Image (cartoon, rainbow, N blue to C red):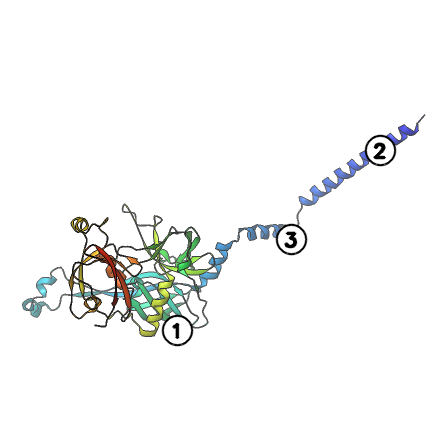
Amino acid sequence: MLTHKKAVILIAALLIFSGSIFYLVEQKDSLYHDSKNTPGDVQSKSDDITNSRRNVITETVKKVSPTIVGINVTQVVTYNDPFGSMFNDPFFRQFFGNQNNSQKVKSLGSGFIISSDGYIVTNDHVAGNASEITVTMTDGEQVPAKLVGSDKSTDICLLKINKSNLPYVTLGNSDDCIIGEWVIALGNPFGLFEVNDKPTVTVGVISSTGLNLEPIEDRYYLNMIQTDAAINGGNSGGPLVNSAGDVIGMNTIIYTAGGVQGNIGLGFAIPINKIKGIITELKDKGKIDRDYNVGMAIQNIDELIAQSSKLKTTKGVIVTQVVANASASRSGLKVGDIILKVDNYTISNDQMIKGVFQEFRTGQTISLNILRDDEPMTIKMTLEKK
């Protein structure tokens, strides 16, 4: 006979069993439906994966890429015949004529559009001496460009194409760079831009700032930005962009070692704040006004001079001559003075001070920190017109 207690236990067991069966059926139904996703479900998951791969780097590249251009230039290079020194003699020239020869040389580089009306920035060593300049846009169109102005000392060049309503970059603030922040280098290495009308992109970080490099062919590289973003031949003139999409520099030179021709992680960019000032002057005047006469001669400091002047290092330069009625003499500078600093630039050698003076303009007054008879002092110098 079924007691009340037994009846309660039986009903509970039946409820648990029926619940388990219902759960298994639901799971089976769920598995069945999951194994047969609709096309819409697959597309949705694919979109989710794609969206998860998009980040600040990819969005910045998408934003900046249309402003990048490839630059092809033709330069006329004059070279002497191997026997040129003999043929330069008037006696031989009357028989053989002038033996100097000219040849057209083609090269390439990168650039970036800075205004909707077609102004383009690149390096002087890319296009500064070009007789013909052709710009390749990201839609494949090739457009002739004219040289607005170029400054060899700072290696900055301004071009113009006859186009309007163009996409253009945002110029940032290179004084605000953070060592270690992500940066992107865009450009035309080895002419790859022309293969598919798109710039090549490399990513790295800012390795250092404020670097003063040795000059190359009378081009002076001061206050440079160092990056490990790969920069190769043809990248010169392209922008270095931060993760916000602002241009903070122009990719210009790389250091190589051991005969290696490619990038080894040492690339350098001209800071955009310097570029802003130069291109404004080039746009207004077509040149940079350095028509002043410092009026002094200098030499590097050797160990003997350093010991006699009680210097801890051989950094700095010593004045060996002061020209009368020129900027140096009017400032009170004297032979034997040791120049350690010019404005905010610490002077290491004679090449350094030559580069530093390229930073200033006619009529500007600058400060010189010097040692005179082992005593430190500061003098002011106005850069007077020649």
For marks 2 and 1 on the same chain, the one whose residue lies earlier in the sequence: 2
In percent of width and height, residue 61 lies at: 46, 58
Mark 2 is on which residue type? Ala
Position above or below: 3 against 168: above
Asked if the residue under mark 1 is in contact with the one under mark 2, i.e. CB atoms within 8 Å, the reply is: no
Q: Is residue 146 visible?
A: no
Give the residue pinned by disc 1. 162
Give the residue pinned by disc 2. 12
Mark 1 is on which residue type? Asn
For marks 1 and 3 on the same chain, the one whose residue lies earlier in the sequence: 3
Residue furthest top as drawn: 1
Asked if the residue under mark 2 is in contact with the one under mark 3, i.e. CB atoms within 8 Å, the reply is: no
User: Judging from the image, what secondary structure is the residue with disc 3 in?
Assistant: helix
Q: Left of 104 or right of it: where is 235?
A: right
Mark 3 is on which residue type? Gly
Residue placed most toward the observer, 188 or 83: 188
For marks 3 and 2 on the same chain, the one whose residue lies earlier in the sequence: 2
- Residue 209 appears in which quarter of the rendering? bottom left
- Residue 163 appears in which quarter of the rendering? bottom left
User: Judging from the image, what secondary structure is the residue with disc 2 in?
Assistant: helix
